[in-house]
Amino acid sequence: MMAVEPRKAAEARKAASHLVTVLGAGSRRISSFACSEDEPVLAAMLRARCGPVVCGCFGGGCGVCRMRVVSGRFAKAKAMSRAHVSEADERDGVALICCVKPLSDMEIEELRPQA
Ligand code: FES
């Protein structure tokens, strides 16, 4: 068996990082931040302090982080409340960004608050 240097092992454990771009009205670019594959997009947005969401439950229940994923791939880390994301919304790219982790660079768009 071959020993692995601790530094190389730590690098191997480090998840890939992707660029998340926040779009506003008219697809105008508002900000961008890095998010690793093992971190919810909302957590990275708050850490970078560059996005429209400034708080939330982080549990998929309050809906304040509801946004549309315009491009990119992601994994669902938690179930999203159907009270905030219907099946039709989900097919249209709507997601609770506290519940998703990026698998590629992503573009996400602000949504108007739900009525
Ligand atoms: S922060 Fe509450 S649902 Fe995302």
Image (cartoon, rainbow, N blue to C red):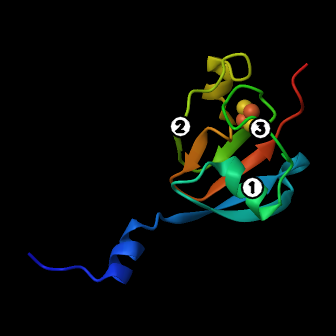
Q: Amino acid under label 2?
A: Lys
- Give the residue drawn at x 53%, y 38%: 77
Residue 59 higher or lower than 27, as above or below: above
Q: Amino acid under label 3?
A: Cys
- Residue 44 position in % (x across, y down): 69, 57
Of 8 and 36, nearer the camera is: 8
| Residue occupied by mark 3 | 65
Q: Is mark 2 within 8 Å of ligand 1?
A: no
- Give the residue drawn at x 83%, y 60%: 50
Please tell me how crowded label 3 is: few (under 14), some (14-19), or many (20+) other residues with Cα within 10 Å. many
Please tell me how crowded label 1 is: few (under 14), some (14-19), or many (20+) other residues with Cα within 10 Å. many
Instruction: Count all numbered tags in the image, as a single digit.
Output: 3
Quarter location, residue 7: bottom left
- Name the secondary structure under disc 1: helix
Label 3 to label 2, Cα distance in Å? 14 Å
The quarter of the image holding the N terminus is: bottom left
- Residue 26 position in % (x across, y down): 88, 48
- Residue 36 position in % (x across, y down): 56, 60
Of 24 and 103, nearer the camera is: 103
Of the residues under marks 1 and 2, which one precedes in the sequence?
1
- Give the residue drawn at x 50%, y 53%: 103
Is there a contact, CB below 8 Å, between mark 3 and mark 2? no
- Residue 19 position in % (x across, y down): 64, 64
| Residue occupied by mark 1 | 45
Q: Is mark 3 within 8 Å of ligand 1?
A: yes
Q: Amino acid under label 1?
A: Met
| Residue occupied by mark 2 | 76
Of the residues under marks 1 and 3, which one precedes in the sequence?
1
The quarter of the image holding the C terminus is: top right
